[in-house]
Amino acid sequence: MHRLWRALLCGVLTSLAAMVPARAQDWPTRPVTLVSLFSTGGTGDVVMRAIAKALGDTFGQQFVIDYRLGAGGAVGSASVARAPPDGYTFMMTATGPAVLNRILLKSVPYNTDTDFTPVIVLGDIPQLIVSSPQLGFKQLPDLVDFGKRNPGTLNVGHAGAGSMGHLAAALFLARSGIQGTLIGYRGAAPVVADVLSGQMHAGFPIVIPAAASVTTLAVTSDQRLGFLPDVPTAREAGTDLLAGTWFAIMAPAGVPKPIVMQVNQTIDRFLKSEGGAQQLARLGMRALGGPPERLTQVIENDRRTWGPVIANENFLLDSN
């Protein structure tokens, strides 16, 4: 009798073990939700749509974008952290929501290390330093001079609390010796719109097509961008400022590894294809890709880089 029970138990365990990869192989059997923390029309949205199409074409299922904005990405991130780890919810995040929020804000309703499964880093992109054409500035020192001559007057827009634009703008004011006001928006597009109208003196958006309508004074990369060869880096223009935003795909913690790897490999092929790389390049983004472990390393590197900078500058940023 004992031998019979052991045989039955072994059979059940073997069947269960066989079912796990089968489910992963059959995935997806229904539409998959891609949570976006970024407003429509911005760079994050354009990239997300390209990724959704690449995944849909490969797997023959809809990958539906669900926009969950607010609190510098914390609202959407927290919702994904609570989602079932069944492979039907993924999220496109970035440096701000994944790394900076926990450094800059007093309370964050998720833990990047324990609540999410890294999938793939998509690419990175620097911030632009732009100003209203109505001000007539030609170079970054013009903006710095205006801010110094008018203490407390300069207002600077950024893409939301905890974003790289927020951090870069705050660091710019501190290192330039300017007293100014930081104004948070929901994404880069409304920042550019208000800079263009003159409601904002300056802004720190990432590269988006609409930015061509305003005056670009500098980029926060370590070298000039190939598609903006005449725009100097902030360092070239006299302000020691280096900042960039990466975008990545993550999932709730506990998603089966076979599903994670299917998504990773599909997106990686897209990023390394000529068409995929060109799509990102048109947005000012350098395609990265690679295994999930690369994203883990990027997150760790950013913590080591920005943690001391924030501490040294005595930053603790509020909802602005």
Image (cartoon, helix red, strand yellow):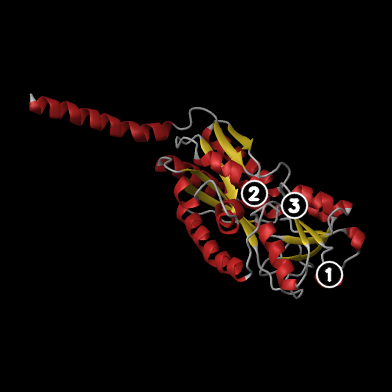
Alpha-carbon span between mark 2 and mark 1: 30 Å
281 sits to left or right of 295: right
Q: Which mark is residue 72?
A: 2
The first of marks 2 and 1 along the sequence is: 2
At a point 77% along the width and 73% down the height, the residue shown is 237
Give 105 or 299, whichever is nearer the viewer.
Answer: 105
Tell me the crowding category of disc 2: few under 14, some 14 to 19, or many 20 or more residues within 10 angstroms, Cα based: many
Alpha-carbon span between mark 3 and mark 2: 19 Å
Whether 88 is drawn above or below 174: the answer is above
Indicate the secondary structure of the residue bearing disc 2.
helix
Tell me the crowding category of disc 1: few under 14, some 14 to 19, or many 20 or more residues within 10 angstroms, Cα based: some
Q: Residue beneath label 3, please?
A: 208
Residue 40: x and y, percent?
71, 41
**Quadrant placement of the N terminus:** top left
- Marks 1/3 in contact by CB < 8 Å: the verdict is no
Indicate the secondary structure of the residue bearing disc 1.
loop
201 sits to left or right of 88: right
Q: Quadrant of residue 308?
A: bottom right
The first of marks 1 and 3 along the sequence is: 1
Q: Quadrant of residue 177?
A: bottom right
